[in-house]
Amino acid sequence: MRFLGGFYLLLAATRHTPTARAALHYPNALISRMEHLLVDTDGSFRSGFKDAINPCTNYISGAQTLGRQTSAQWLRVAFHDFVTAHVDEGTGGIDASIGFETLRAEDSGSAFNDSFAFFAPFVDAQTSMADLVALSVVTSLGHCGGLHVPYRAGRIDATGGGPFGVPEPETSLEETLEEFANAGFNAEDAIGLTACGHSLGRVHHGGFPNVVPESAIAPNNTAGGVNLDSTRDKFDISIVKEYLGNYGQRGGPLVTSDNVTVRSDLRLYESDQNRTMQALGQSKEYFFSTCGNLFERMINTVPREVTLSDVIHPMTVQPVNFTFDIINDQALRLSGVVRYLPSDNAAPSTLEVSLADKAGKTMASITARVIEEKGNSFWGATAYYPVVFDINLAGIASRNNLPGKLQVRTASPQTFELQPELFFIPSRSSPGTGISVGAAIGAAARSRNSTLSVESVEAVVSVPVSQTGTLAPKVEKHELNLERDQDIGLYSIFKGNLSDDLAFNLQTTVDITATFSDGTVWQDSYNRFAVP
């Protein structure tokens, strides 16, 4: 086995430092990551997650002539993952178990593997496939209709398939309602979620030949899709209006099929004499409100052991890809991009950004200029401002002189706390040359009277890898002890060797933990070899 490169680290000792966060994942790594995927959907630094459904008729996994629609597939994937939950037992729900279930008759069609294949490159130590399944619902509905469904993160991926129990077109009304009830949805909820979910997309002969006749196949519709309503690419009330008014698609093939046994939507809608459908059809506002609530409940149905985050709200000012680095053994660099999401969509051409030390004294100020390519997400227009600060290491005499606050002046100025004591060194890190990590050692730690010492410095490298039975990657973790290698100013560089048989990819991340003799712990989490 051959080994590559190393980790480097400097440690600052102070008896007043609590467990620390990474340099700048605001407010933490999970929320920062998922907020980025949720909001940065267009323009510079876009996540790329929304690309699959732009336009909303797009099919990301094959020829457009198939007539399939990724935005609708995402809703179907989430529903199939959710509906086998048993809430009384605390099992199932949105846990990505559907990836292991694609050979079941109740999960026919290409939607599941199509979607997981697209989601897979986004999975990493902070991003579960289950969170992406939920995010896809929010993204699809927001982009293809303007319905904002509140989003929470923290789902955990299943390690195998869940129970059977997805309603099929032939399933009886009684069994269908029982399966919904197991998942925590009563009869009215079942009707509502079905109608809401069928506002996008088609039913295809290729997946449901007993529902859609072969005559639906055409040169520009080779999978033989028949629309569920007249606006298949837009989430709207048409599905209800056309059903109640008996015009257009009249509720879609699962209402109108010549094969009476597969009219599963019709059986549901008529089960309460159409009262729920009539209520949904009273106004766009009521339809959106009801559907939003049902979709939110669906994606928040998770196994009992999962604790979801608070609702993730788009942040007006968000630091993106901010990192510390050591440049030419002489300068401490802080660089990244400030994303601005103004309420009036009028982003200024410049932003004033300053850097203050731990004591609050301004170290440097710059005028950051907006990048020409702006974003236009369904949360509003986004603008991006590159920021670089270089601080001479020779001028940093103590921990209080380290950069501690990033201040962004907007209509509502914001200050972000930094952690310069411990950080991954990007310029010295890559899968080919090893990984470097830096952390500051304060004057107290180096004084002759100080008895504080570094007990250990450890790295955990998280690598998403393929697994049998599903297209969802699993994240393997590799632990590594780091050793002191050299000193640069207040910083000591710690080094560790990495095996070259690890399957590095763009989603590989590194977490660093430094433990001191008094129990103080510093952490720098969720660092990448390559910034996406």
Image: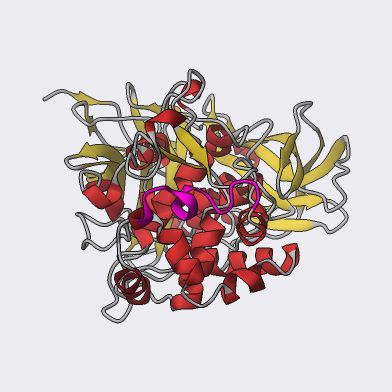
Residue 460 vs residue 211, the one in the foreground = 211
Residue 17, relative to residue 338: is it above or below?
Answer: below
Tell me if residue 248 is in the magenta stretch: yes
Residue 59 visible somewhere in the drawing: yes
Residue at 41 percent across and 47 percent down: it is 258
Q: Quadrant of the N terminus?
A: top left
Tell me if residue 287 is in the magenta stretch: no
- Please, which residue is most extreme toward the top here? 219
Residue at 60 percent across and 69 percent down: it is 277
Residue at 33 percent across and 23 percent down: it is 433
Q: Magenta residues, as a range?
A: 247-260
Residue 101 visible somewhere in the drawing: no
**Relative image position of residue 514 (x, y in whole percent):** 36, 55
Residue 60, relative to residue 512: is it above or below?
Answer: above
Residue 115 vs residue 366, the one in the foreground = 115
Left or right for 112, reference 445: left
Left or right for 478, reference 233: left
